[in-house]
Image (cartoon, rainbow, N blue to C red):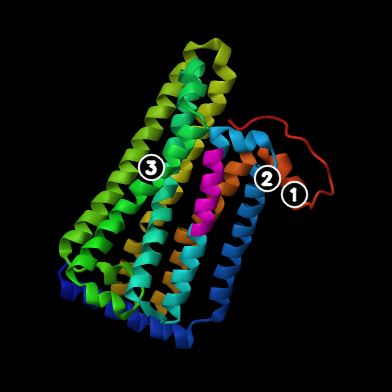
Amino acid sequence: MAMNNESIEGTLLVHQQFFKVEMTEGPASQLIVAILMALVFIFINSIMFYTLLSKPVFRELPRYILFAHMLCNDSVQLLACMTLYLMTVNLQQIPKALCALFLLFATTTFNNAPLNLAVMSLERYVAICFPLRHSEIVNQKSAGVSIGLIWIFSSINLGIDVIYSLMMSPVSFKDSIYCSRERIIISPWQIDKFQGFNYFFFVTVTAILIFSYINVVVAARSASSQKDSAKKAHETILLHLGQLVLCVNSFIYGTIERVLAMTSSSRLFMDLRYMNFLFVLLLPRCLSPLIYGLRDDAVRPLFFYYVRCGYQKVKPSGTMH
């Protein structure tokens, strides 16, 4: 995909024109609904994260450490999405340096989600296919290293753009701009690189999930003593594949919005853009950790215990599969 500077600026001008229409005509109720939805699910994620901190076993087992990382990462991503959305609809200008830092953080947390799913699936694969070596391969240290590598790999894509833009035009980072990723792009190759990295991430994660699922299914058929455990593990990996689909929906958010901006009238664009933001970007990020946590037999009773503020005492009934 090639795009020159004129087309980039043209897209930005179209978006800015539509943003002004939204400020004067867009109903505030839409914005309130989006903010409340994000805050509600951040609150739910916080309770679930507190649940994981409440028991030593949750703090020690790698699969719960990775799940806690997913909760934190998705909560930060929700905050980042809402902040960027609010700055966009209010035509808020901020220094380019601050925008670059904010976008780097938002993009990194976005890319963390599929990579974290891949690591969680590999953990289940090792648990079922190499049970005698599971504690040796997967432990607190390896979980911490995996999380660190996830953040490094996720930040490379936009990090290259920020560094390149800083080298080519350092003075521009003092200017105030409307914060969007297009403002960091100064060369067409950056667009191709950005899309290439994204495709690589999702193809790699999909391959890892399918590889893990196939091997777990094979292990379930060959080892009668582990059939129940393997069945639960491949159900978990199937859930990871479903979560990946939600991540892909978020991935195509920007593409959908650009198409809508160039093909729709201003009023129709505002309505479609809001629905796109709500159901393609925001809602999947809300539902993914909630579904995963409520499925777990150990987390679910404790989660409801804390939701009820401790009015009804419960005990964990199992472990996360």
* Dot 2 and dot 1 residues touching (CB under 8 Å): yes
Q: Is 306 within the magenta?
A: no
- Give residue 107's position: percent from left, percent from top: 38, 58
- Name the side, left or right, on which 66 lies relative to 196: right
- In three-dimensional space, the C-alpha distance between marks 3 and 1, rounded to whole angstroms, equals 32 Å
Q: Which residue corresponds to the image point at 43% horizontal and 31% vertical from the top-left?
A: 122
Mark with earlier residue (2, 1): 2
Q: Secondary structure at mark 2?
A: helix
* Residue closer to the observer: 211 or 59: 59
Camera-side mark, 3 or 1? 3
Which range of residues does the magenta coloring cover? 65-76
Q: Position of residue 299 (x, y in %)?
A: 67, 39
Q: Which residue is mark 1?
A: 306
| Number of numbered callouts drawn | 3
Residue drawn at (30%, 57%), measured in percent from left and top? 159
| Residue plotted at (55% across, 42% down) | 67
**Quadrant location, the C terminus:** top right
Q: Residue at x 20, y 66 (%)?
A: 167
Residue 147 appearing in the image: yes
On the image, numbered disc 3 is attached to which residue? 149
Circle 3: residue type: Leu
Q: Which quadrant holds residue 189?
A: bottom left
**Mark 1 closeness class: few <14, some 14–19, many ≥20 residues within 10 Å:** some
- For badge 1, the amino acid type reads Tyr
Q: Secondary structure at mark 1?
A: helix
Mark 2: amino acid: Thr
Classify the position of the N terminus by image quarter: bottom left
Quick one: label 3, few (<14), some, or many (20+) residues within 10 Å? some
**Quadrant hosting residue 21:** bottom left
Indicate which disc residue 51 carries.
2
Distance from the alpha carbon under mark 3 to that under mark 2: 26 Å
